[in-house]
Image: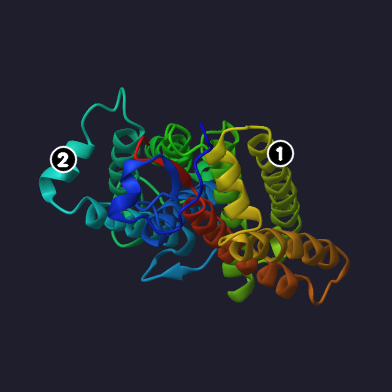
Amino acid sequence: MAKPTLIERERTYDRFAPHLVPQPHWRGPHALWFWAMGLGAGTFMVRHAFSLTDTGTVLGLSLLDVVGLVLVGIGGLILILDLGRPERVLKALKRPDRSWIARGALADFVFLIIGALYLLPGWFGALPWTDEPFLEANLTAQVMIAISFAAAAVIIAYPGMVLYESISIRLWHSALVPAQFIAHALTSSLGLTLFVLAVNGRLEDVRTELGVGFLVGLVATLGITHMYVLDRAHEHTPAARAGLHRLLRGGMAAHFWTSVLIGFGVPVVLTLIAFAATAAGPALLAIGGALSVAGSLQFRYAQLCAGVKVSPLG
């Protein structure tokens, strides 16, 4: 039996014989959803992992925490719009023991509710908890942060698990895909934090530790991406090979290589220069951070759109 060929646009009469076709469902809105969720949850985690106190405020609330909540809220809104009807939203919450979508949706709600409560002392100072970072907060606030932190970890990881469990899309069925999502989310969150602090003139005191963390994240992301490409190249199914070809040399190649080289490769160079450049360091880190944020979104889009399945069997 001949191997199925790739058809870019499936037509009705194509369904009478097996062939390869780009998956039609997960596109730009889903890339934005995954990106916003990971970036928002990661930004919250970065603020507390690095115990960042002086990050600026918006409407009297901690700027980085607000950014994290807003981004996760945007991702959740895209998810709700994608599901379409309220009953489908409720259905998505069922069976968290079996569904990563359900686990992720529950984590979204927990993060948004507990995170919003944690921020309220910025408006209501008489509340019995503080909005300081974890190590400086009181016990009540630490419990809130810990719950939000755990929910944020699920939010970062679950889209990668959803793709990994999409067995018909062989480009995604790799254990390195969840690792990619984690690396992208944490690295771009460090990049966003560097950008926000540099713009607000609050980077100097934490420049070294954040810069080192960012550099480690960039290198780890590039390394995981390289291993992922090698892993998919060693899968010999037609769908895996066609998907990898679309990602590296086909329709998504420009997005993929731009995200890798400009979104993560260039920031490595800028960060190394920033360590030696006293005056220009904050600006270089801010540029590198912004590039990583944009590169992460572009990578998500390229990876989703490069997915190929066997049709009509898949």
Amino acid under disc 1: Leu
Q: Residue at x 86, y 71 (%)?
A: 277
In the image, 32 versus 283, the foreground residue is 32
Amino acid under disc 2: Leu
Residue 161 as seen in the image, left or right of residue 59? right
Locate residue 20, reporting x and y percent.
46, 45
Q: Residue at x 36, y 35 (%)?
A: 313
Against 294, residue 22 (above or below) is above
Can residue 50 be seen in this snapshot? no
N-terminal-most mark, 1 or 2:
2
Can residue 158 be seen in this snapshot? yes
In the image, 219 versus 198, the foreground residue is 219
Q: Secondary structure at mark 2?
A: helix
In the image, 256 versus 236, the foreground residue is 236
Against 254, residue 164 (above or below) is above
Circle 1 Cα neighbour tier, 10 Å, few/some/many (<14 / 14–19 / ≥20): few
Quarter of the rendering containing residue 226: top right
Q: Which residue is mark 1?
A: 230
